[in-house]
Image (tube, coloured by chain):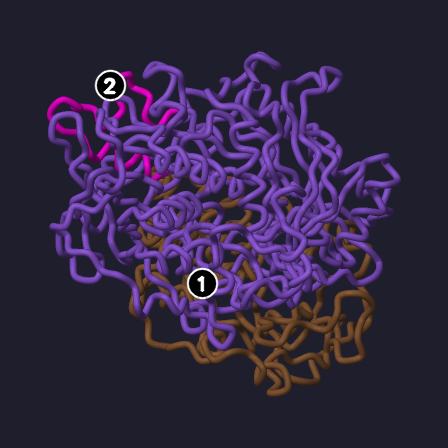
């Protein structure tokens, strides 16, 4: 698809230190998990962040039948088509198995947990009725097309008749980015300094020599133009 | 505000607030409130002078003030008594426990996200995760009907709250430049240094002829008692582990506990039973073991905020009050309000690194009041915010990006700055908290939050978005992203001059139940364009003064201790 050519990971710097999702990013020598940084975090914070790097692989919330669809779907939403991946699926599973909710449920969609099952059922339903194949077996282009239609709220029939489809996309999308961008590998990719307690960051005037340096601002100012053919609705 | 401070206190360092030693009672070596270990405990059967529901901005201030006057006070708090060293983390996702995440249903034409956006739980309430802005209301906020023909006039005026604004600003303490808007005033602490993000905004605003000033934020700028100086790490919304940012945990509860208040954590209020027209106390559920308990009290104050306060009144339906307490005129839950809070992000060729400073930096109230040339009533304030990665991802997703587009905007994070507004949306009776069919884990009906904007609201938000875009253009931004969102909850049990126009009178007494008070943001008649924390505290401070001096009595016998 058009949106992928410009964001070809080969055009971005390869990570030299630490890990980023798919080993690309803007700060190839920045690793927030380096002991010189993570070693200064307070104990409670360190425990919470490091737990994300080694999530449980055993699923408690999603069923085995749901796994292929869920993995393909979350890979599309975060464009994670190669290892190393932020384990979004496993993180979501832990969240819902532990009964963590956001504190509100829109009146036109079911409970978050039930909604996830419904969306996965819906994707299977649409993949079968449109392509006669399972969502996970589709070409990436067909998977993206279904995701776009989910975002636009135009998927119909089967499970999609039971709730507001557009809203469902926004709820699952928010859940996915919440997990992905809580992961320190994602912070490496974007140059986010991470937790800062009891030490603060370096001062916020001019950049400090101890700060991560950005390399090759290649996409830079043209993000919007380059994205015109991308996944924008 | 000069006369009340003696020169001697000034010479000792920071100006010390009167009759509140909270900052001096904390332990510089640990963040846990030391008074918790020696906290007084009351028996359920002991009739205390006041039982407060909710240990947030409203409840904590009320408790501290009355404890100083000898009242025996129990505060029931649904959430935990935090040990910040152990329970708070400097991390977005890890701060989930600070939010009210029990189920609520949200709907209407323009549904409001609850949870982390505006609802807290635990000792300290939502102020644990508030950004830190503590502006005052303008005098006009109390009479929008008279001045602008919208909303509802408050039964009290700016003058009634002014001394309490001053006192609560000292207690926070609030840092900022001299404030030229509304009722012009200064702040006890000097303005904080600002980040590159604020400088970029300041630059654009100046070129548009808009004045912005540093502050007003409830963050100590200098050592304040045993609270340290801010270390500018930008994690204000995740609970300030430094204790530099104000919250009841640092500003009111240490002094309250030192004067005999019990804060009973993990205690979810379920019902306020009456005998005749008097509240007998509060029924509650111990969240640690599910046990149902009942605290007797001579008077009750509910400070559960704009969703849980109306919910508790509605869940307290009983003979004589078949539709809930204070609801005989069908007013409970009505006119619940949120502020329109769109944010416009801008990209710069150089690095901004907006995560590195406290989100609240500079603000402007130049557009706060009604300007007939804009074509709508009331206005908005401009403020900085500094989204961390997850909040920034929500920004990008709101513009429709996912997949590679999302990843690329996220990689560009350090080049972006974000400007925000708080638009005053009008109180509308159809916007309402009611009970849903669903029940929570305790079997209590959950709240349903219905919200739709009116035309004036839409015009206000559209104008503010346009102005923010204009500022960024003048700052030479290269690219812009916009997100529509809401901030802050207030109203739902507003003050009124009669039961047909509100749930409480100007002394916070629920109509028809004279020893039941509401002491939180739910009593707001209008919301202004100000963040509500300081106003909530000032209202409680005023209520406490009236209760303590006997100017408010509950059914003939004054509330308060027998003496």
Q: Residue at 48% x, 63% y: name it.
A: B93
Q: Residue at 46% x, 62% y: name it.
A: B95
Which chain letter matches label 1? A
Q: How many marks?
A: 2
Prevailing secondary structure of the magenta residues = loop
Which chain letter matches label 2? B
In the visual, does B61 lie left or right of B103? right
Question: With respect to residue A31, does B357 lie above or below?
Answer: above
The answer, for residue A128, to whether it is visible in the render is no
Q: Which chain corresponds to the colour purple?
A: B
| Residue stretch rendered in magenta on the structure | B307-334
Quadrant position of the N terminus of chain B in the picture: top right
Position in image of residue B120 (x %, y %): 41, 51
Q: Alpha carbon of mark 2 to alpha carbon of mark 1: how far? A: 57 Å
Please tell me the numbered disc located at residue B328. 2
The stretch drawn in magenta includes residue A171: no
Question: With respect to residue B114, does A97 lie above or below?
Answer: below
The answer, for residue B245, to whether it is visible in the render is yes
CB atoms at circles 2 and 1 under 8 Å apart? no
Position in image of residue A114 (x %, y %): 31, 51
Badge 2 and badge 1 in a common chain: no
The residue mark sitting in front, 2 or 1, is: 2
Label 1 CA crowd tier, 10 Å (few <14, some 14–19, many 20+): some
Please state which of residues B11 and B236 is positioned toward the viewer in this rendering: B11
Q: Secondary structure at mark 1?
A: helix
Q: Which chain corresponds to the colour brown?
A: A
Quadrant position of the C terminus of chain B in the picture: top left
Label 1, on which residue? A136
The stretch drawn in magenta includes residue B319: yes
Label 2 CA crowd tier, 10 Å (few <14, some 14–19, many 20+): some
Q: Residue at 13% x, 56% y: name it.
A: B291
Q: Quadrant of residue A184?
A: bottom right
């Amino acid at each position: 698809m058009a949106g992928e050519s410009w964001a070809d990971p080969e055009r971005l710097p390869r990570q030299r230190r630490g890990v980023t999702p798919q080993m690309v990013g803007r700060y190839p020598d920045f690793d927030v998990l380096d002991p010189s940084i993570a070693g200064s975090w307070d104990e409670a914070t360190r425990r919470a962040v490091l737990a994300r790097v080694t999530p449980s692989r055993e699923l408690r919330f999603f069923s085995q039948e749901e796994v292929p669809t869920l993995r393909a779907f979350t890979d599309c939403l975060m464009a994670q088509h190669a290892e190393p991946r932020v384990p979004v699926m496993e993180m979501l599973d832990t969240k819902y198995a532990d009964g963590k909710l956001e504190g509100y449920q829109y009146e036109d969609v079911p409970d978050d947990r039930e909604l996830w099952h419904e969306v996965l059922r819906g994707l299977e339903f649409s993949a079968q009725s449109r392509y006669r194949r399972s969502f996970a077996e589709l070409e990436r282009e067909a998977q993206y097309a279904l995701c776009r239609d989910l975002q636009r709220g135009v998927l119909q029939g089967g499970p999609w008749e039971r709730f507001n489809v557009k809203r469902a996309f926004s709820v699952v999308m928010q859940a996915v980015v919440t997990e992905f961008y809580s992961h320190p590998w994602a912070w490496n990719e974007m140059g986010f300094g991470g937790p800062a307690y009891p030490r603060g960051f370096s001062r916020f005037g001019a950049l400090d020599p101890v700060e991560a340096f950005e390399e090759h601002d290649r996409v830079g100012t043209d993000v919007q133009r380059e994205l015109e053919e991308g996944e924008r609705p | 505000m000069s006369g009340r401070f003696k020169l001697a206190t000034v010479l000792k360092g920071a100006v010390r607030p009167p009759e509140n030693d909270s900052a001096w009672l904390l332990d510089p070596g640990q963040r846990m409130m030391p008074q918790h270990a020696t906290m007084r405990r009351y028996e359920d059967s002991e009739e205390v002078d006041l039982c407060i529901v909710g240990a947030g901005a409203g409840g904590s201030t009320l408790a501290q003030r009355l404890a100083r006057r000898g009242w025996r006070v129990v505060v029931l708090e649904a959430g935990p008594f935090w040990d910040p060293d152990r329970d708070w983390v400097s991390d977005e996702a890890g701060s989930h426990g600070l939010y009210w995440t029990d189920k609520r249903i949200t709907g209407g034409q323009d549904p409001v996200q609850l949870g982390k956006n505006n609802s807290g739980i635990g000792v300290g309430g939502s102020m644990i995760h508030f950004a830190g802005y503590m502006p005052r209301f303008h005098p006009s906020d109390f009479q929008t009907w008279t001045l602008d023909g919208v909303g509802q006039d408050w039964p009290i005026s700016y003058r009634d709250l002014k001394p309490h604004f001053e006192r609560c600003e000292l207690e926070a303490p609030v840092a900022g430049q001299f404030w030229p808007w509304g009722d012009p005033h200064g702040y006890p602490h000097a303005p904080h240094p600002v980040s590159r993000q604020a400088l970029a905004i300041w630059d654009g605003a100046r070129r548009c002829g808009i004045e912005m000033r540093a502050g007003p934020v409830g963050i100590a700028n200098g050592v304040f008692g045993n609270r340290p100086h801010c270390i500018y790490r930008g994690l204000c919304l995740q609970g300030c582990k430094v204790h530099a940012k104000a919250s009841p945990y640092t500003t009111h509860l240490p002094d309250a506990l030192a004067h005999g208040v019990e804060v009973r954590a993990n205690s979810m209020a379920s019902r306020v039973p009456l005998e005749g027209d008097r509240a007998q106390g509060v029924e509650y559920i111990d969240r640690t073991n599910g046990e149902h308990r009942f605290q007797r009290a001579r008077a009750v104050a509910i400070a559960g905020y704009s969703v849980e306060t109306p919910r508790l009144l509605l869940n307290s339906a009983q003979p004589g009050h078949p539709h809930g307490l204070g609801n005989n005129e069908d007013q409970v839950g009505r006119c619940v309000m949120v502020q329109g809070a769109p944010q416009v992000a801008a990209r710069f060729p150089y690095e901004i690194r907006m995560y590195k400073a406290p989100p609240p930096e500079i603000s402007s109230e130049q557009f706060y009041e009604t300007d007939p040339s804009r074509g709508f009533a009331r206005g908005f304030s401009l403020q900085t915010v500094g989204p961390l990665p997850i909040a920034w991802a929500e920004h990008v997703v709101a513009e429709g990006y996912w997949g590679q587009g999302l990843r690329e905007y996220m990689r560009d994070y350090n080049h972006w700055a974000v400007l925000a507004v708080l638009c005053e949306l009008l109180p509308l009776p159809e916007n309402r908290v009611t009970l849903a069919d669903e029940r929570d884990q305790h079997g209590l009906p959950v709240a349903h939050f219905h919200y739709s904007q009116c035309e004036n609201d839409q015009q206000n938000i559209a104008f503010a978005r346009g102005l923010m875009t204009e500022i960024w253009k003048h700052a030479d931004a290269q690219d812009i992203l916009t997100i529509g969102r809401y901030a802050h909850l207030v109203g739902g049990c507003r003050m009124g001059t009669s039961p047909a126009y509100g749930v409480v009178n100007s002394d916070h007494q629920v109509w028809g139940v004279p020893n039941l008070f509401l002491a939180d943001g739910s009593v707001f008649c209008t919301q202004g364009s100000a963040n509500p924390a300081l106003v909530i505290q000032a209202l409680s401070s005023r209520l406490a003064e009236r209760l303590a001096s006997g100017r408010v009595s509950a059914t003939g016998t004054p509330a308060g201790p027998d003496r």
